[in-house]
Image (tube, helix red, strand yellow):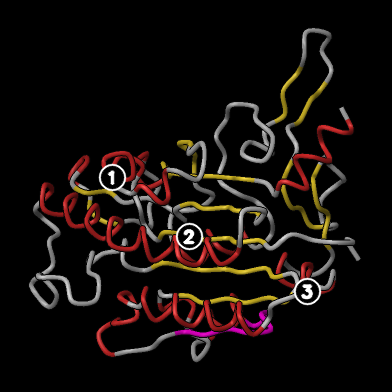
């Protein structure tokens, strides 16, 4: 057991580009803390989340604790140093600094073993538990919901996910929660429920329109995400990020699933719980 645990939220804004995040009017998300440009662990949803569920977050390469916990550096005396990870699995890696060390096949199992209620919802088809890859990603959650629909309508499920998450948080009040939320609106076709262009031809091939629509989708989900964060409270630990980025015409490329700087470049915010920060201050 980890003792008293804060609530935790791991949220992925699917395919969101760093530059689109910077350009967006997203006051709820941007007010949460210091967002950084980071490097994704993979080029598409499935392997990216396999890594994140192992505790391996995107890397900022700035030596900061929690956001750059893989790179080994050497100090002026030639001693190897590492930044501290936020969450890590007890195996298969050698021990390294971390705020929380978990047992299990993934952090979902680890937080459950430590006593947390595990709650998850995914928007992309990779999270559909009716499909084999989806069962790999979602099978460990105690409570899980995928909002299915024709023509990948689940990409536009932000409001439905919010309502379900708020219900689950009410039902689990008084217990620590680990919450996972994969947001689909920022994924191509860049649509949200009821948007003026819903059902129109996709915008690939038009760079300006693609950038605009991804930005508008982020702006749409900004207050929706804020409602869930408000319900979790000020002490909740937050890991908010894109799972990967997106090429929108760079070098003639569109989409993701291949190694390109625009695919690997993502926004990320890590805000440890106040109890964690207080413990670090006491240790210092």
Tell me which corner region of the image, top left, top right, bottom left or bottom right, holds residue 196: bottom left
Label 3 sits on residue? 112
Q: Counting residues from the N terminus, which is met first, the one under dot 1 or under dot 2?
A: 2
Residue at the top extreme, as displayed: 76
Estimate the x, y position of residue 165 in percent, counting from the top left: 52, 77
Q: Counting residues from the N terminus, which is met first, the one under dot 2 or under dot 3?
A: 2
User: In what quadrant of the picture does the C terminus appear?
Assistant: top right
| Image position of 88 with respect to 160: above or below | above
- Labelled pair 1, 2 in contact (Cβ < 8 Å): no
Q: What distance separates the C-alpha of mark 3 from that of mark 1? A: 35 Å
**Numbered tag placed on residue 87 in the rendering:** none
The residue lying at 84 percent from left, 8 percent from top is 77
Crowding around mark 3 (Cα neighbors within 10 Å: few <14, some 14 to 19, many 20+) is many
Q: Nearer the viewer, residue 153 or 163?
A: 163
Label 2 sits on residue? 12
The residue lying at 61 percent from left, 69 percent from top is 179
User: In what quadrant of the picture does the N terminus appear?
Assistant: bottom right
Estimate the x, y position of residue 145 in percent, counting from the top left: 52, 85
Q: Nearer the viewer, residue 47 or 276?
A: 276
**Numbered tag placed on residue 20 in the rendering:** 1
For the residue labelled by badge 1, is the local secondary structure a helix, a strand or a loop? helix
Estimate the x, y position of residue 182 in percent, counting from the top left: 47, 68
Tell me which corner region of the image, top left, top right, bottom left or bottom right, holds residue 270: top right
The part of the chain drawn in magenta is 139-146
- Residue 140 counted in the magenta span: yes
The residue lying at 21 percent from left, 40 percent from top is 251
């Amino acid at each position: 057991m980890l003792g008293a645990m804060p609530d935790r939220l791991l949220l992925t804004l699917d395919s969101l580009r760093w530059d689109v995040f910077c350009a967006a009017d997203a006051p709820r998300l941007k007010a949460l803390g210091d967002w950084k440009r980071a490097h994704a662990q993979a080029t598409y949803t499935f392997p990216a989340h396999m890594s994140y569920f192992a505790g391996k977050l995107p890397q900022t390469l700035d030596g900061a604790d929690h956001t750059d916990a893989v790179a080994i550096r050497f100090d002026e005396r030639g001693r190897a140093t590492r930044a501290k990870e936020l969450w890590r699995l007890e195996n298969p890696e050698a021990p390294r600094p971390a705020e929380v060390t978990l047992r299990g096949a993934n952090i979902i199992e680890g937080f459950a073993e430590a006593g947390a209620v595990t709650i998850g919802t995914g928007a992309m088809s990779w999270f559909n538990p009716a499909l084999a890859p989806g069962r790999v990603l979602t099978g460990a959650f105690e409570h899980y919901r995928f909002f299915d629909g024709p023509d990948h309508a689940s990409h536009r499920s932000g409001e439905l996910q919010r309502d379900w998450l708020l219900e689950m948080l009410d039902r689990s009040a008084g217990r620590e929660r680990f919450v996972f939320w994969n947001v689909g609106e920022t994924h191509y076709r860049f649509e949200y429920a009821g948007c003026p262009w819903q059902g129109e031809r996709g915008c690939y091939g038009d760079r300006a329109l693609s950038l605009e629509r991804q930005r508008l989708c982020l702006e749409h989900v900004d207050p929706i995400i804020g409602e869930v964060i408000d319900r979790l409270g000020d002490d909740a630990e937050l890991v908010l990020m894109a799972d990967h980025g997106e090429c929108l015409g760079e070098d003639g490329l569109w989409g993701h699933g291949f190694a390109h700087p625009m695919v690997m470049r993502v926004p990320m915010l890590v805000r440890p719980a106040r109890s964690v920060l207080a413990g670090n201050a006491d240790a210092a």
